[in-house]
Image: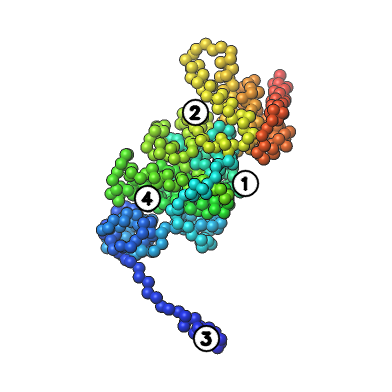
Amino acid sequence: MASTTAALTQLLAKHRAELSARETGSVLQISHGVALVDGLPGVQAMELVEFEAGLFGLAFDLDPEQIGVVLLDAGAAIVAGSRVRRSGRVADVPVGTALLGRVVNALGQPLDEQGPLTTCERSPIEREAPAILERAPVTEPLQTGIKVIDAAIPIGRGQRQLIVGDRQTGKTAIALATLVNQRHSDVVCVYCAIGQRGDAVARAIETLRTEQIIRQTVVVVAAAEDPPGLQFITPYAATSIAEYFMRLGRDVVIVYDDLTHHALAYRELSLLLRRPPGREAYPGDIFHIHARLLERATRLAAGGSLTAMPIMEIEAENLAAYIATNLISITDGQIYLSPELFHKGLLPAVDVGKSVSRVGGKAQLPAYRLVAGVLKLYYAQFEELEMFARFGTRLDKSTRQILDRGQRVREILKQPERAALSPFEQILVLLAVTEGLFDAVPLHDVAQAELMLRAVATRQLAALGQRVQRGETLTGDDRAALLGAAQQALATREADGNRTNP
Ligand SMILES: Nc1ncnc2c1ncn2[C@@H]1O[C@H](COP(=O)(O)OP(=O)(O)OP(=O)(O)O)[C@@H](O)[C@H]1O
């Protein structure tokens, strides 16, 4: 007892009471999502400020007379004259492995039913992008499991690949398929939903759960009904969460679904803050806000990478729209989804001609060399000829053959949602179709024949499959083995078909 008292006395003797001064101000004016405040002369840019009811905002515009604060909570309780005080800290977000499997908002508040977060590390939501010397070239592939993307528009780890298309063309489906395909790797996934409808976000989370990828995924959400300030900071916060894993040396992929809503939220804030509007009423720094976000994606020389897949919705296939052209110029390539292909049922509706990957080719597994170049060339040739053939021109034999084979290539490139193929399976079927092994298969039978081919050849050539996966280059003999197995499998199928339908 005596020793406890002595210890407490000692502790009290050391204690020095200190007064800490906190600047407080008051709200001059409040409108949807934005408040004008005075009396916070020392406030920093992007500092969190706290209103009376425990609501938070971000100091955004630092004018000498007044501070423009964007609200991060619905501000019904804030009125003109409400007190506001500085928090002394720049907006930050909890980071750490405890976030895996969780659904949070940009402030790190859990939105799922799994209780509070058990992480104490925090990271500012806005961070400098890695310096040039910290970066390494993109050399490793990020497999999506989607034939047309992995073969013709490959994505590398650390790349920024835009997914762009009209509404309802399957943009989210491609992004989610890419995340789901990381299930058997140790890639960390971050799905960042910005301004989406609640049911669309719930569906995406459900997919991540049922496909069992959620335990290596962090979901960061700002719903359509959230204040524009919260929507604006969400992708930055999600990137900080992703960067934490990258700095640990992990490969990370982040999906921003979508940056159209992000740009709209920023335009709304800027107009409310009376910043001068520019083209399409967007403020002048709209390019910069996306560039500084996407610059944070990279591959680090010390190990670890962050691959960014921003999604952008356009209207009436207008790829030359303002935000779309900005994003196209910032990213390392784009996957363009065409509504016309979508309505024809050619899913995924990737328009190979308008899609490009500027760095992915160097990261693609070497075995794809057997098919990638031929596929693109063949497809371009076929599409051009198909257009002419529509005019009813009489066709010679070789043109007819290109058209027939092209139709089969297109049929092979169809792929149901989340029916991922391994690189070996992709190379096998693409090689078989471009080499004409499917020419004799009726169009309506192509999908069935493909399934059979994959099942048989994967079993027969298991060792070759492992070599593809290890990143080995395939030789002429390997190519012959692939074609031989494919030919045999398709011939057996045809013979079986003839026996059942004499
Ligand atoms: N490869 C596919 N096979 C079959 N259905 C698909 C495929 N890809 C997408 N779909 C379907 O197309 C519909 C639209 O897809 P999705 O929601 O991904 O499009 P989106 O462009 O992200 O839409 P939004 O504009 O609403 O964000 C969904 O019902 C989805 O299931």
448 with respect to 18 (left or right) = right
Secondary structure category for the residue under label 1? loop
Secondary structure category for the residue under label 3? helix
Q: Are marks 2 and 1 in contact (CB under 8 Å)?
A: no
- In percent of width and height, residue 160 lies at 49, 41
The three-letter amino acid code for the residue at tag 3 is Thr
Work out whether mark 2 precedes mark 1 in sequence or the reverse, and give the earlier one.
1
Circle 1 residue? 185
Q: Is residue 140 visible?
A: yes
The three-letter amino acid code for the residue at tag 1 is Ser
Q: Residue at x 57, y 19 (%)?
A: 402
Q: Are marks 3 and 1 in contact (CB under 8 Å)?
A: no
Separation of disc 3 and disc 1 at Cα?
A: 57 Å
Work out whether mark 3 precedes mark 1 in sequence or the reverse, and give the earlier one.
3
Crowding at dot 2, Cα within 10 Å, few <14 / some 14-19 / many 20+, comes out as few
Circle 4 residue? 228
Q: Residue at x 56, y 19 (%)?
A: 403
Separation of disc 4 and disc 3 at Cα?
A: 54 Å
Separation of disc 2 and disc 4 at Cα?
A: 36 Å
Q: Nearer the viewer, residue 358 or 241?
A: 358
Circle 3 residue? 5
Circle 2 residue? 353
The three-letter amino acid code for the residue at tag 4 is Pro
Q: Is residue 191 visible?
A: no
Q: Quadrant of residue 22?
A: bottom left
**Disc 4 beta carbon < 8 A from ligand 1?**
no
Crowding at dot 3, Cα within 10 Å, few <14 / some 14-19 / many 20+, comes out as few
